[in-house]
C-alpha cells in the first residue's frame, strides 16, 4: 500500500506546471549555444558573420526556435553532418524564394 501511495505521489509530481513549460519562440544566444553545446562566443561569431540565421534587435541577437527545429530536422533527414554555412545559405535562398 505504501508503494501505491509513492507511485501516485510521483505521478502527480511529474505533472507539475514547472515541468510543462512551453517552448520559447526565440532563444537568447546562451540558450541557443547550449542547444548545440557551443560556447556563447562561438554562437555570437556565427550570428554576426551571417553563418547562422538569427535576428538582431538593437544590440541583442536571438535565434528563432523554428531555425533550431528546422536545422535538427534537416540533420536527421540528411543522415550525416551538415556544414552550417552551407545550410544557412540554402535557408536564405529558400526564404528569399518564398517572399517573392
Image (cartoon, rainbow, N blue to C red):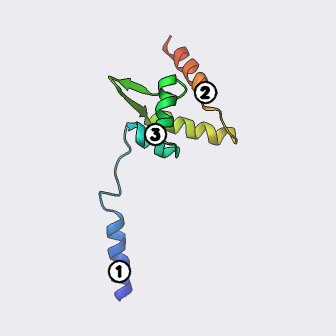
**Label 1 secondary element:** helix
Read off the residue under disc 3.
40
Which sits earlier in the primary sequence, circle 1 or circle 3? 1
Quadrant, the N terminus? bottom left
Callout 2–callout 3 Cβ contact below 8 Å: no
**Label 2 secondary element:** helix
Which sits earlier in the primary sequence, circle 2 or circle 3? 3
Which sits earlier in the primary sequence, circle 2 or circle 1? 1
- Residue positioned most to the top: 100
The alpha-carbon separation of the residues under discs 2 and 3 comes to 18 Å
The alpha-carbon separation of the residues under discs 2 and 1 comes to 51 Å
Read off the residue under disc 2.
85
Which numbered circle lies on residue 6?
1
Residue 16: percent from left, percent from top: 30, 62
Residue at x 53% of width, y 15% of height: 96
Dot 1 alpha-carbon crowd within 10 angstroms: few under 14, some 14 to 19, many 20 or more = few
Residue at x 56% of width, y 24% of height: 91
Amino acid at each position: 500500500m505504501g508503494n501505491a501511495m509513492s507511485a501516485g505521489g510521483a505521478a502527480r509530481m511529474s505533472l507539475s506546471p514547472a515541468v510543462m513549460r512551453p517552448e520559447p519562440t526565440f532563444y537568447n544566444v546562451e540558450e541557443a549555444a547550449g542547444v548545440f553545446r557551443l560556447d556563447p562566443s562561438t554562437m555570437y561569431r556565427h550570428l554576426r558573420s551571417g553563418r547562422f540565421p538569427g535576428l538582431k534587435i538593437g544590440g541583442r541577437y536571438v535565434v528563432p526556435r523554428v531555425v533550431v527545429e528546422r536545422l535538427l530536422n534537416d540533420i536527421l533527414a540528411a543522415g550525416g553532418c551538415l556544414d552550417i554555412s552551407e545550410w544557412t545559405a540554402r535557408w536564405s535562398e529558400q526564404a528569399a524564394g518564398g517572399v517573392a
